[in-house]
Amino acid sequence: MASGAELIRSVKEQITEIDPKDVHEGLSLNGSGPVLVDVREQHEFEEAHLPGAVHVPRGHLESRIEGAAPDRSREVVLYCASGNRSALAAHTLKTLLGYENVESMTGGITLWKDRGYEVEVPRALTPEQRTRYSRHILVPEIGLEGQLKLLDAKVLLLGAGGLGSPVALYLAAAGVGTLGIVDDDEVDLSNLQRQVAHTTDRIGTPKVDSAEQSIHDINPGVEVRKYATRLDSSNIMEIIEGYDVIVDGVDNFPTRYLLNDASVRLKIPVVSASILGFDGQLSVFAPYDGPCYRCLYPTPPPAELAPSCGANGVLGALPGVMGVLQAIEVVKLVTGAGEPLIGRLLLYEALSTQFTDLKLRRDPDCPICSRDPGEISDEEMGVFPDYEAFCAAAG
Ligand SMILES: [Zn+2]
């Protein structure tokens, strides 16, 4: 049986090694150079790494290398701390995974630094943040990088009601850096059956203030921007501009159409949910990536079917489920993890406990998203029948 040292010697004879000087020269090729892969552990990568390196820890090499380097004929340079782990990894890529042009950097990042070449030191979390978000950082799809994206993210919540409440609480807990809230309503006793961001002692206070209080109770690091107003065509562009994602929890059709048209113009994805009784719906409208709201519903439904005309009943926990699903879609959009619900409509029927997933297609003749954003005028946004008349027709 070979000793560990003998094994590494023998592996190094079977692979190609590359000197840090040659790697350094390759880096200046800007894009046409090799794929640089750091195979060390998470904490080592976070301390410092080579500029432009991607991180694939050796323990996940086989399962994740294809994501980092899909082209097996392209030059791949692996490195670690001193050149041993990367030699073993290079051997695996060459002999087991068919990578044709793989090299291990001699002496690892230690020799690289000794030669005086630059390293990238990633932005760090404070010790408090590191503890607060430790369970996120342990999830490979989020990690430190994803958490930093969440901290940089600006998310706008339309409505601090049944859907907006769980979204606000979970996104605050998740560390979304900026949460905007649009709501012109005050906390009412009849809200408390489902709007869990508000409390009995805050009845009569503006919902934006009450939601801000709950957000800061959970996470004082979140910046809250309050808009105690109603969205209309005169203010929508100004309010939504600059946000990365919009969470739609509004319960009326005119606002939904207006929001759709404005978000398509500004190319901001909207995570949209609606609820009625025991039923919920969810989709992500990502302008030009998937269908928009008008691709699905080019014209509003018959007035008698419009749930926003007057008071309707809803199971208190239902917006909890749908709002938490919205919060998860936001986290996916911000971090790039998984496949967001773009071009799909999720239906949740609570009474039968069924989730159904329908495919949605873009309408090539959509009145809004079939055109360039620049062609959509202010006058066209939110074009919708007169709302009072619309609801009156429902009787
Ligand atoms: Zn469309």
Image (cartoon, grey):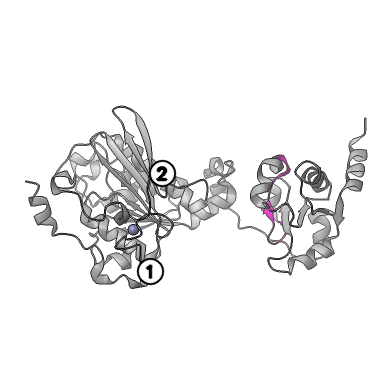
- Quarter of image, ligand 1: bottom left
The amino acid type found where label 2 is placed reads Tyr
Q: Find residue 346 and report its image quarter.
A: top left
Nearest the eye: 45 or 349: 349
Q: How many marks?
A: 2
User: In the rendered structure, are the residues bearing label 1 and label 2 in contact, judged by CB atoms less than 8 Å apart?
Assistant: no
Mark 1 vs mark 2: give the one in front.
Answer: 1
Q: Let me know if residue 241 appears in the view.
A: no
Q: Let me know if residue 343 appears in the view.
A: yes
- Residue depicted at x 83% and y 50%: 83
Q: Main secondary structure of the magenta part?
A: loop
> In this image, 148 relative to 360: left or right?
right
Residue 355 magenta-highlighted: no
Q: CA distance from mark 1 to mark 2?
A: 35 Å
Q: Find residue 110 and report its image quarter.
A: bottom right
Q: Secondary structure at mark 2?
A: helix
Residue 53 magenta-highlighted: yes
Q: Which residue is mark 2?
A: 170
Nearest the eye: 135 or 284: 284
Nearest the eye: 281 or 298: 298
Mark 1 Cα shell of 10 Å, populated few (<14), some (14-19), many (≥20): few
Nearest the eye: 153 or 207: 153
Q: Position of residue 63 (x, y in %)?
A: 67, 41
Residue sticking out furthest to the front:
364
Q: Position of residue 168 (x, y in %)?
A: 36, 47
Asked if 43 appears above or below 321 in the picture, the reply is below
Q: Quadrant of the N terminus?
A: top right
Mark 1 and mark 2 lie on one chain; the one further toward the N terminus is 2
What's drawn in magenta, residue-wise? 49-59
Residue 372, numbered label:
1
